[in-house]
């Protein structure tokens, strides 16, 4: 099924243009150099077409944020009363003044535009590079990503008319760089397989779980029920990017081995975005992430309908399809959107401009307000194979550092300790949200001068929570090599949220939606196992230590299903 982006009903309003000095241009965004790993290889050919998106300022994004917290904070009288798509769009749509001003500018330059979001806040234009150079007083160039040789047309600085500064958030893609996404789990070194795997359904945690993680280990460690979920409307979405395909035969083999109590034919639904496909043959190592994500959702969230949402190669939004996917979900009718969405792909924060990152984050805010819990792996510092995240865990990862998503870090071992690769830290783009302000302050006190000057003390701290992320057995396990990464942790935590939603819906209650205000509440944190040992040294730095309470390695801790049920009044 191809999702069409919902188109706003009302056309752009063409008001009589008031005379203004449209030629007074001001620099709207600039950066001194391209993102790490990119080099400029020449000027972009002036005749080639460029697709640009213009994000107009929403009329009341602060109002949407307040509304989101009102429905997501268990202490609020509106808790659980998720917004409708119309209510969200009313906050996000630009004012008539903004629409008129931007339309007038485009019309004056003979450019037609089309909205690409339900609220109409982002419009798309297609113009030759030469015309874009004039329109934005810039010079678009070809940049090459050295490791992959992938090229893209970008610029280090662009301008817009001064009169439009208050109306436009960004024109894109311009100063944001989209590297091939990281997020593939790592294969561990060859190690001896335990003589016996954990038996499915056993309550005590088998010692084999210290070397290899299977669904039975996670069920035993976190108390995840094996009883089938009952609510057909309760969808769990799994994001797939960059040609990652989830293999049905692999899933069947996985379930046969590790969930013999389930029908081995249990599968996922496929949903395509931006021309995404789910090729089944030939199998390639490119399928490891997608297989991991589908196996540890279908195989853990027993009988919850899982949808694998696959985005075409690089998406058409200039951010690998991240924004298009969420926009499409926002445009879906209520009742068909996933209640939980897990994504195991990340950017380095500085890849994207502050304004593009902010709008992307605000797109998650919209989907969260509609009632979807959005989980991201926090990223794997220093161990991302061919795409190292600059070998430092002081580079925050996007979108995990967006305050409106739940970032999931990794642990390992039966006596859980922080995984050394578990990315975490503090954003330079997003300020500390109030739900974690006490936690961050306490942590910074404990930290003292450690890593002083290497991170932003006023930035949003991440991750929020954690789950196992080392030595996962998947269908692709060969020669006793297992996979590891926060890529394992996010689907695990998402499955638990999906099972809780199943119980909530069965009890006539709304699904959880944006999780963080609940997780950071006294009841929420009491239902998590605080991880107090280990740290995330990444390559050569000291990293951050896990401590008692919240820390930027394992967040508030790992899930305890029974305690979460109780905390939610189930
Ligand atoms: C904005 O424009 C729409 C469509 O023309 C109109 O219905 C609405 O009343 C206008 N809103 C304001 C506040 O002027
Ligand atoms: C876990 O910790 C407990 C208490 O510290 C200890 O008794 C036990 O042996 C440990 N288990 C493993 C598998 O390390
Ligand atoms: C630190 O974080 C704050 C809050 O997001 C931000 O405003 C500020 O620009 C950041 N500082 C640096 C040096 O990036």
Image (cartoon, rainbow, N blue to C red):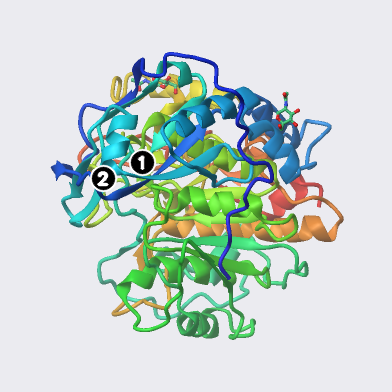
Q: Is residue 515 visible?
A: no
Quadrant of the image for the N terminus?
bottom right
Q: Which residue is nearer to you in this view: 370 or 291?
A: 370
Which SS class for mark 1? loop
Dot 1 alpha-carbon crowd within 10 angstroms: few under 14, some 14 to 19, many 20 or more:
many
Label 2's element? strand
Determine contact: label 1, label 2, CB under 8 Å.
yes
User: Which percent across, then down, holds residue 16?
Assistant: 59, 23
Query: Could you say which is closer to the camera, residue 205 or residue 200?
Result: 200
* Residue 179, percent from left and from top: 29, 49
The residue that mark 1 highlights is 173
Depth check, front residue: 146 or 97: 97
State the image coordinates of residue 495 (x, y, percent, origin top left).
60, 61
Indicate yes or no: mark 1 CB to ligand 3 under 8 Å: no
Q: Residue 304: horizontal and vertical position, in percent?
A: 67, 68
C-alpha separation, residue under disc 1 versus residue under disc 2: 8 Å
The residue lying at 21 percent from left, 40 percent from top is 36
Residue at point 36%, 66% (across, down): 483
Residue denoted by label 2: 153
Name the side, left or right, on which 76 lies relative to 284: right
Q: Is residue 159 visible?
A: yes
Instruction: Tell me the number on the disc at residue 6.
Output: none
**Residue at horizontal 46%, vertical 67%?**
276
């Amino acid at each position: 099924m191809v999702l069409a982006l919902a188109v706003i009903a009302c056309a752009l309003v063409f008001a009589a243009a008031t005379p203004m000095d449209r030629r007074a241009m001001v620099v709207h965004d600039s950066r001194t150099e391209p993102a790490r790993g990119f080099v400029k290889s020449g000027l972009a050919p002036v005749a080639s077409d460029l697709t640009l998106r213009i994000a107009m300022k929403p009329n009341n994004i602060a109002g949407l944020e307040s509304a989101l917290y009102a429905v997501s904070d268990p202490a609020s009288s509106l808790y659980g009363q998720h917004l409708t798509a119309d209510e969200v769009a009313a906050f996000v749509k630009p004012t008539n003044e903004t629409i008129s001003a931007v339309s007038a500018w485009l019309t004056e330059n003979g450019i037609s535009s089309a909205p690409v979001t339900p609220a109409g806040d982002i419009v798309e234009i297609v113009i030759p590079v030469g015309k874009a150079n004039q329109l934005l007083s810039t010079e678009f160039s070809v940049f090459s990503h050295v490791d992959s040789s992938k090229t893209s047309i970008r610029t280090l600085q662009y301008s817009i008319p001064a009169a439009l500064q208050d109306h436009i958030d960004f024109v894109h893609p311009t100063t944001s760089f989209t590297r091939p996404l990281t997020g593939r789990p790592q294969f561990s070194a060859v190690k001896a397989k335990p003589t016996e795997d954990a038996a499915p359904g056993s309550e005590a945690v088998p010692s084999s779980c210290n070397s290899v993680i299977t669904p039975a280990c996670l069920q035993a460690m976190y108390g995840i029920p094996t009883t089938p979920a009952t609510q057909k409307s309760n969808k769990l979405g799994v994001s797939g990017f960059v040609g990652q395909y989830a293999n049905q035969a692999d899933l069947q083999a996985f379930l046969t081995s590790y969930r013999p109590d389930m029908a081995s034919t249990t599968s996922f639904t496929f949903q395509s975005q931006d021309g995404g496909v789910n090729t089944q043959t030939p199998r390639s190592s490119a399928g490891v992430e997608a297989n991991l994500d589908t196996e540890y959702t279908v195989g853990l969230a027993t009988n919850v309908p899982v949808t694998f949402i696959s985005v075409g190669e690089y998406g058409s939004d200039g951010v690998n399809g991240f924004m298009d996917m969420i926009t499409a979900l926002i445009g879906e009718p209520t009742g068909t959107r996933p209640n939980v969405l897990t994504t195991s792909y990340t950017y380095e924060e500085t890849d994207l401009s502050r304004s593009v990152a902010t709008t992307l984050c605000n797109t998650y805010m919209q989907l969260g307000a509609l009632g979807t819990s959005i989980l991201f792996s926090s990223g794997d510092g220093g161990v991302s194979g061919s795409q190292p995240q600059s070998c430092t865990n002081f580079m925050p990862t996007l979108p995990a550092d967006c305050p409106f998503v739940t970032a999931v870090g990794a642990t390992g071992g039966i006596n859980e300790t922080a995984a050394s690769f578990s990315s975490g830290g503090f954003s330079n783009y997003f300020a500390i949200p109030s739900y974690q302000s006490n936690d961050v302050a306490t942590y910074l006190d404990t930290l003292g001068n450690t890593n002083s000057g290497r991170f932003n003390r006023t930035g949003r701290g991440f991750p929020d929570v954690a789950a196992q992320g080392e030595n996962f057995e998947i269908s692709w396990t060969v020669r006793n090599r297992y996979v590891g990464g926060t890529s394992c942790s996010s689907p695990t935590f998402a499955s638990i949220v999906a099972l809780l939603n199943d119980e909530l819906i069965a009890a006539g209650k709304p699904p959880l939606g944006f999780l963080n205000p609940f997780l950071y509440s006294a009841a929420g944190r009491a239902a998590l196992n605080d991880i107090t040992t280990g740290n995330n040294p990444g390559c050569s730095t000291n990293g951050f230590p896990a401590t008692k309470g919240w820390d930027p390695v394992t967040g508030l801790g790992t899930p305890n299903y029974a305690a979460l049920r109780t905390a939610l009044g189930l």
